[in-house]
Image: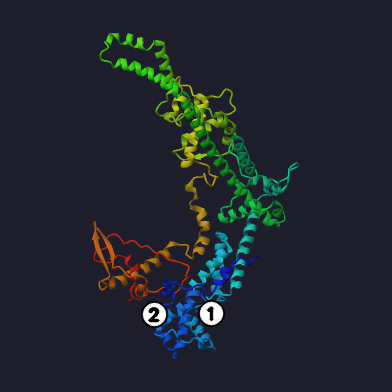
């Protein structure tokens, strides 16, 4: 259970003033309202009043009382002293002497509702909240430490010592990890257990274990590399861990454990306790299966892109090679057409005149050259793409046999073509004429169907590969077990999975499981703020409603810069008393439809939270 996860900077700023508070923080945490001043004014001596106010602001800002209550930045002392009408030259040294400041701290705790960290109810809520976050999200310990600190400040629980909270974070994360290992280790069957243990063995004649071999992703872009990538996915799939239901295991925890297993040495995994070893191997197999599938599909996408690029390069090179022949043939045809457009040449003598200037054989050769070298407007180097059939033929049978493609309604023609190609392999002779042609676009029809209507297998295969890439990128064709190439719609949490995760997610977010209480509380808060704002709207000259293009707009009088922040908060905002200085809240409320133009909208209270 390691606890040395805090950085020196985190330890330095925990529970003390690490830097000078910003003007916004001064106004939020050290502003004193009338009730605060009434309680402070009971003190007779200036240094007692100033010291009480500084402790009050400190516990609001830091969430704890300082051992030396006078160890406060000068900007804070000046800001608080100005509100109390005390000169900043007041000597605070006397305040730190004796038990007066301890009495003040006790009074602040009792009157403002602060709790000790050891309070059983608050301690239980904190541990339960931390455990829910550690189980669902597997956050880094330093992040969980900062979040726990912010929660304690928000709930008005005095911060414990830094090592106390750090050890608690470590214990909670250790409990969550132990639970994960026990849960995962109990899921595999005896046969699956043996398959997972076999990942750590080193085959005879090899120098690395199966785990090390399965870790390596493809590093080259070739048909052979793609075959090996598909074989890698098939080997991991043979472990049979896909059939194990992990719906009740948080995906982030499984991913983190699998990532750790993919980075650590195989002997390190072999030395782990039984539960942790099996859990680590199961997470590795489950996450690596998805990774291997994604790697194979990524390589397939790169392969198709490379084939299209090479076909284009070959086509452009061929056009450059034959451009001189094409120019010569075009000039001959131009010479013949010039005679045709010559009005001085009689119609009856056109053919004789043309053949006199351009021999008939030369003109026929020019026509044949133009027919052979020119391309249709919709041609995109399709003929050169067909030459890449040899590369596709090496990996296509295994690819279609191992990877389970699925599709939406828009990608169904491609899926039908893939099924046809998969069934076509091994047939003698192949019945290519029964191929579904809905997948063939207009540009490919000339090569796929041909002039006699017979389907060309090579052209059909390359056409399907091109359409497969397009549909994969649009997710009209997808692979359910993949992460990057799966159906995006299934990533939404719904149904039984959401019902199973609802308590932990709501507990981690600090929300109730049912929406009705949350909506009721928000509605009451909105109504209260709306009524308060409406009662002060007619007397507030800084705010008005104007109609613009049939819609009401809220117009606010421009404010000065930071020097007016305190006046704005005192006159228009109910100050926020508690919360972490590192958390920012943002609320957006829409104006209800049908509201009267003379009444303020319910969004107004965000800007005009006037006191009653």
Mark before the other along the chain sequence, 1 or 2: 2
- The numbered dot on residue 66 is 1
Point 28% across, 8% down: residue: 348
Mark 2: which secondary structure?
loop
Q: In this view, does 208 lie above or below 140?
A: above
Is residue 186 visible to us here? no
Left or right: 26 as drawn, with respect to 551: right
* Residue 232 x, y percent position in the rendering: 63, 41
Which label belongs to residue 138? none
- In the depicted structure, whether residue 570 falls above or below residue 217: below
| Crowd band around label 1 with a 10 angstrom C-alpha radius: few (<14), some (14–19), many (20+) | some
Find the residue positioned furthest to the bottom: 44
Query: Residue 320, position in %: x, y?
Result: 46, 27
Q: Can residue 444 be seen in this view?
A: yes
**Residue neighbourhood size for the residue with mark 2, other residues' Cα within 10 Å, grouped as few (<14), some (14–19), many (≥20):** few
| Label 1 SS | loop
Instruction: Where is residue 109? Give x, y as percent.
Output: 50, 81
Frontmost residue, 230 versus 612: 230
State the quadrant of the N terminus.
Answer: bottom right
Q: Nearer the viewer, mark 1 or mark 2?
A: 1
Q: Where is residue 311 in the image (x, y as percent from the top left)?
A: 50, 31
**Quarter of image, res 573:** bottom left
Tell me whether the residue at label 1 lies in contact with that at label 2, contact meaning CB atoms closer than 8 angstroms.
Answer: no
- Residue placed most toward the observer, 167 or 236: 167
Side of 185 relative to 27 (left or right): right
Label 1 to label 2: alpha-carbon separation: 23 Å
Q: Point out the image quarter for the C terminus.
A: bottom left
Q: Quadrant of residue 543?
A: bottom left
Is 331 situated above or below 536?
above
Where is 445 relative to 480, above or below?
Answer: above
Residue found 50% across the figure and 55% down from its top:
498
Q: Mark 2 points at which residue?
A: 33
């Amino acid at each position: 259970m390691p606890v040395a996860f805090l950085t020196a900077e985190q330890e330095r700023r925990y529970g003390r003033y690490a830097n000078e508070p910003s003007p916004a923080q001064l106004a939020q945490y050290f502003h004193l309202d009338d009730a605060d001043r009434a309680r402070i004014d009971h003190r007779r001596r200036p240094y007692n009043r100033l010291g009480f106010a500084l402790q009050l602001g400190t516990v609001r800002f830091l969430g704890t009382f300082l051992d030396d209550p006078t160890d406060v930045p000068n900007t804070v002392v000046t800001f608080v002293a100005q509100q109390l009408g005390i000169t900043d030259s007041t000597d605070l040294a006397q305040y730190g002497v004796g038990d007066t400041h301890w009495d003040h701290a006790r009074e602040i705790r009792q009157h403002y509702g602060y709790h000790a960290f050891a309070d059983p109810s608050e301690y239980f809520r904190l541990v339960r909240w931390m455990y829910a976050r550690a189980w669902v999200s597997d956050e880094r310990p330093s992040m969980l430490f900062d979040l726990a600190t912010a929660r304690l400040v928000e709930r008005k629980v005095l911060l414990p010592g830094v090592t106390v909270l750090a050890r608690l974070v470590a214990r909670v994360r250790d409990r969550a990890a132990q639970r994960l290992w026990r849960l995962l280790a109990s899921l595999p069957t005896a046969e699956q257990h043996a398959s997972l243990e076999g990942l750590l063995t080193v085959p005879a004649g090899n120098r690395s274990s199966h785990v090390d071999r399965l870790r390596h992703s493809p590093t080259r872009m070739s048909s052979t590399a793609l075959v090996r990538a598909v074989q890698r996915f098939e080997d991991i799939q043979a472990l049979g861990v896909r059939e194990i239901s992990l719906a009740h295991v948080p995906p982030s925890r499984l991913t983190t454990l699998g990532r750790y297993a993919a980075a650590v040495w195989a002997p390190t995994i072999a030395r782990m306790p039984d539960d942790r070893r099996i859990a680590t191997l199961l997470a590795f197999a489950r996450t690596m299966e998805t990774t291997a599938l994604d790697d194979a599909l990524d390589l397939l996408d790169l392969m198709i892109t490379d084939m299209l690029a090479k076909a284009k390069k070959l086509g452009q090179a061929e056009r450059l090679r034959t451009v001189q022949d094409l120019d010569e043939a075009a000039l001959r045809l131009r010479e013949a057409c010039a005679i045709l457009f010559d009005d001085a040449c009689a119609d009856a003598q056109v053919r004789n005149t043309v053949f006199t200037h351009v021999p008939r054989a030369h003109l026929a050769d020019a026509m044949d050259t133009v027919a052979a070298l020119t391309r249709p407007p919709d041609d995109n180097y399709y003929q050169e793409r067909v030459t890449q059939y040899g590369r596709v033929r090496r990996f296509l049978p295994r690819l279609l046999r191992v990877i389970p493609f699925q599709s939406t309604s828009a990608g169904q023609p491609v899926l039908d073509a893939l099924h046809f190609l998969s069934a076509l392999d091994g047939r003698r002779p192949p019945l290519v004429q029964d191929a579904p042609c809905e997948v063939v676009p207009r540009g490919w029809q000339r090569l796929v169907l041909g002039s006699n209507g017979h389907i060309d297998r090579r052209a059909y295969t390359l056409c399907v590969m091109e359409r497969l890439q397009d549909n994969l990128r649009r997710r009209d064709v997808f692979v359910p077990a993949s992460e990057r190439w799966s159906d995006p719609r299934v990533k939404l949490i719904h149904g039984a999975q959401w019902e199973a995760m609802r308590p932990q997610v709501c507990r981690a977010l600090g929300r109730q499981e049912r929406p009705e209480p949350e909506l009721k509380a928000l509605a009451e808060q909105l109504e209260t703020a709306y009524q308060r704002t409406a009662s002060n709207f007619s007397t507030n000259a800084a705010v008005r409603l104007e109609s613009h293009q049939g819609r009401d707009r809220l117009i606010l009088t421009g404010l000065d810069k930071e020097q007016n922040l305190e006046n704005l908060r005192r006159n228009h905002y109910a100050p926020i008393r508690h919360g972490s200085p590192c958390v920012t809240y943002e609320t957006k409320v829409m104006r209800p439809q049908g509201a009267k133009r003379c009444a303020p909208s319910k969004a107004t209270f965000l800007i005009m939270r006037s006191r009653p």
